[in-house]
Image (cartoon, rainbow, N blue to C red):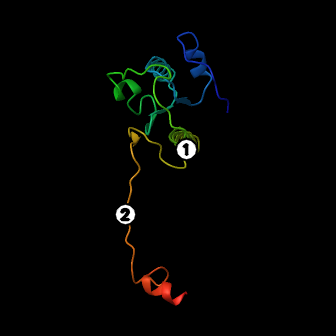
Amino acid sequence: MEAVHDYITKENVDSLVQSADIAVDCAHNFTERNLLNEACVRWQKPMVEAAMDGMEAYLTTIIPGVTPCLSCLFPEKPDWNQRGFSVVGAVSGTLACLSALEVIKLITKFSQPLLSQLLTIVEFAKRNFYHDPSCLVCGSSSCSENS
């Protein structure tokens, strides 16, 4: 596996996509995202699409001819500029791990990737749980017995 650290341009996108088995899109702007999406469709290459802003993120897997493409997902492009949004390290790390899992799913076919589905991370679900006063371990009666 080889990571490419170049910006996507009209001049390099086709050669980069042709040399890849899977593209992972985490570009900072929609100019690059659109170029990569179009090339992946043109060359029939799967693309894992990942984006984030602050505490929010989204992830999907695009397979040309099977799923909608990025232009279907975002017919009206958000006005993102390069590095013009906030990045929280823990969110980008989480998104990177989930993106890697999507690639693993595509390669191994071990589990179903996010095909025609958009995973969004806005806020993790929070659940309150009940403290049982009669609990044998931490209940009020257990504290006096353990003293």
Q: Position of residue 91 (x, y in %)?
A: 50, 41
Where is 25 relative to 55, above or below?
A: above
Tell me what residue is drawn at x 57 percent, y 40 percent: 100
Where is 146 relative to 44, above or below?
A: below
Name the image quarter holding residue 118: top left
Front residue (pair 131, 113): 131
Of marks 1 and 2, which one's residue comes earlier in the chain? 1
Tell me what residue is drawn at x 56 percent, y 9 percent: 11
Q: Position of residue 13 (x, y in %)?
A: 55, 16
| Dot 2 amino acid type | Asn
Q: Mark 2 — residue?
A: 128
Closer to viewer: mark 1 or mark 2: 2
Q: Quadrant of the N terminus?
A: top right
**Contact flag, marks 1 and 2 (Cβ < 8 Å):** no
Secondary structure of residue under mark 2: loop
Q: Position of residue 52 (x, y in %)?
A: 46, 34
On residue 101, the disc is 1
| Dot 1 amino acid type | Leu
For label 1, the crowd category at 10 Å Cα-Cα, with few meaning under 14, some 14 to 19 and many 20 or more, is some
Q: Quadrant of the C terminus?
A: bottom right
Tell me what residue is drawn at x 58 percent, y 13 percent: 12
For label 2, the crowd category at 10 Å Cα-Cα, with few meaning under 14, some 14 to 19 and many 20 or more, is few
Front residue (pair 18, 121): 121
Secondary structure of residue under mark 1: helix
> Gap between marks 1 and 2, in whole Å?
29 Å
Name the image quarter holding residue 31: top left
Left or right: residue 63 versus residue 20 is left
